[in-house]
Amino acid sequence: MLFLGGCEAVAQRLSQLLHADLFEIKPETPYTEADLDWHDAKSRSTIEMNDPSSRPAIAEKLDTMDQYNVVLVGFPIWWHTAPTIISTFLESYDFSGKTMVPFFTSGGGGTGKSDEDMHAACAGTATWKPSHRLTSADSDQELSAWIDSLAL
């Protein structure tokens, strides 16, 4: 299971429920609070999200990707889609034959165009499940029900 910052608590709980490995997608240059200020048109996150070709570097690569058949990818919604570093990640591996399960956290919005953006960035031919919004308030029973509904 992979995740980006803002959905760490949900990713940890899913990892425990699934007995799954956990890997954090960390930017090579960590985001500061100022970088994440979406009210600031000059903040790093705003600049990245306004540039569809932006591909922030990832701090480390997962060397064991070949051993996984199912990959859960968790991320916060930024500007109605997945952060551009998720595209960096998806372009870094061959996901042929894998089942991709995206989940996201947000302040109340939906998935936006994250499914479309992630599918376009994904290297290889993967089977995609639809993105699903999760929150830290979801009970273990709710998380388990969602996992069961995926029929993995």
Image (spheres, rainbow, N blue to C red):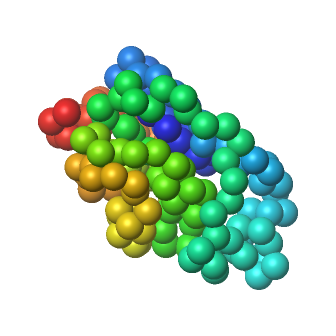
**In this rendering, position of residue 152 left or right of residue 110:** left
* Residue 149 vertical placement versus 46 (above, below): above
**Does the image show residue 7?**
no
- In the depicted view, which residue is nearer to us: 16 or 128? 128
- In the depicted view, which residue is nearer to us: 142 or 71? 71
Image quarter hosting the C terminus? top left
Residue at the outermost top position: 19
State the image quarter where residue 70 is shown.
Answer: top left
**In this rendering, position of residue 5 left or right of residue 143:** right
Counting from the top left corner in percent of width and height, residue 32 is at: 83, 54
* Residue 116 vertical placement versus 31 (above, below): below
Question: Which residue: 80% across, 51% down?
Answer: 29
State the image quarter where residue 35 is shown.
Answer: bottom right
**In this rendering, position of residue 141 left or right of residue 151:** right
Question: Which residue: 23% across, 49% down?
Answer: 127
* Residue 104 vertical placement versus 80 (above, below): above
Question: Which residue: 81% across, 79% down?
Answer: 42
**In this rendering, position of residue 109 left or right of residue 101:** right
Image quarter hosting the N terminus? top left
- In the depicted view, which residue is nearer to us: 80 or 106? 80
- Number of numbered tags placed on the structure image: 0
Question: Which residue: 48% across, 26% down?
Answer: 64
* Residue 80 vertical placement versus 101 (above, below): below
**Does the image show residue 141?**
yes
Counting from the top left corner in percent of width and height, residue 37 is at: 76, 67
